[in-house]
Image: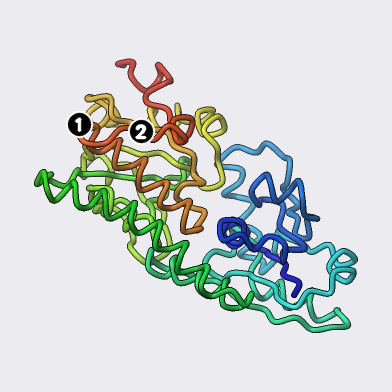
Amino acid sequence: MKIVSFLPAATQMIYDMGLQHLLHGVTFECPAKALEEKPKIVRCIMEGKNYSSAEIDLVFSAAKAQGKSLYYVEEALLQNIQPDIIFTQDTCEVCQIDTKCTAAAVAKLQKQPLIIPLTPNNLTDVYATAVTIAKAAGYEEKAYTYLSGLQKRTDNILDRLRQDKMPLKRVALLEWIEPIYNCGHWIPFQIAQAGGVDMLSSPGGDSVRIEFDKVVKYNPEILIVAPCGFHIERAMQEIHLLAKHEGWHTIDAVKSGNVFVCDAGLFTQPSASTLVDGIELLSSLFHPELFSVPANLRAYYEKNKSSILLERR
């Protein structure tokens, strides 16, 4: 059995379930360990370039309007591997290579692999993809063991919230800075399981562009900034763009110092374990009186690090 993953989330779950011996190729955005051990089959023409948020949005929007993909497949490497299974996705054609592009590359192979798209819309769907992966690999029982451990972690959070009768925190999580996008798909469900509610979000659907005045009117108690694909350091380079908006300093989250810049991988990369990490981090940010930030996640967020967020005009 030879598996190739065109999806970082699939790669993460393959490693989580101990199936990496079956993995023979990955995409350029996969977890570091996979990139060290496996050949990169999928690349992006923007790889290694340092564009601003606005420039990235323009490039991807233009490519989408023209029906072009910014991703490409190293066909010689794929031909050499001759995989039995390729995992891909159709959740977001901006974030990762999609099934259409994958099929075009695969059509040239001598041996036709099985293409399995993993396209979750909510948190339950994400968990189901772990079963899909393990079942396709012939190790279905590993998925149930894996998911059982993750469920215990989320159950512990929910049980504590119920026990202490904690009210839901009014939260906004932004998936992009310029222009501003709300959060969608599984992220609103992560927020709910951490003891919050995001009324600006799109549960089970695509994130969409919103005007900043909606954020001001909604007036979140806690603001999470996690631009898709950005690590903390990269997001901090542009966090000042939010502070330039009219009404920024009137928001409760800003006034109380509850603006957090988080590593987007905990939210926009839909591997089951990663999203549970995200839930644990959010619970500690929403309800610090009940939950401490897990030691392994302390490097995944910053609280008001930039003075630009706090200074008054």
Which of the 4 image quarters holds residue 2? bottom right
Quadrant position of the N terminus in the picture: bottom right
Q: Position of residue 120 (x, y in %)?
A: 46, 69
Write the residue at 46% across / 40% down: 177
- Please state which amino acid type lies under the numbered disc 1: Glu
Q: Secondary structure at mark 2?
A: loop
Q: Is residue 178 left or right of residue 68?
A: left
Residue 120 versus residue 138 in the image, above or below? above
Total count of labels: 2
What whole-number distance in Å separates the C-alpha atoms at marks 2 and 1? 11 Å
Query: Is 8 in front, or is 98?
Result: 8
Write the residue at 77% across / 63% down: 24
Q: Position of residue 296 (x, y in %)?
A: 47, 35
Write the residue at 70% across / 51% down: 34
Q: Secondary structure at mark 1?
A: loop
Residue 203 versus residue 222 in the image, above or below? below
- Please state which amino acid type lies under the numbered disc 2: Val
Q: Position of residue 68 (x, y in %)?
A: 70, 66
Query: Is 233 in front, or is 307?
Result: 233
Residue 311 versus residue 269 in the image, above or below? above
* Residue position for label 2: 293
* Residue position for label 1: 289
Pointer 2 and pointer 1: residues touching (CB < 8 Å)? Answer: no
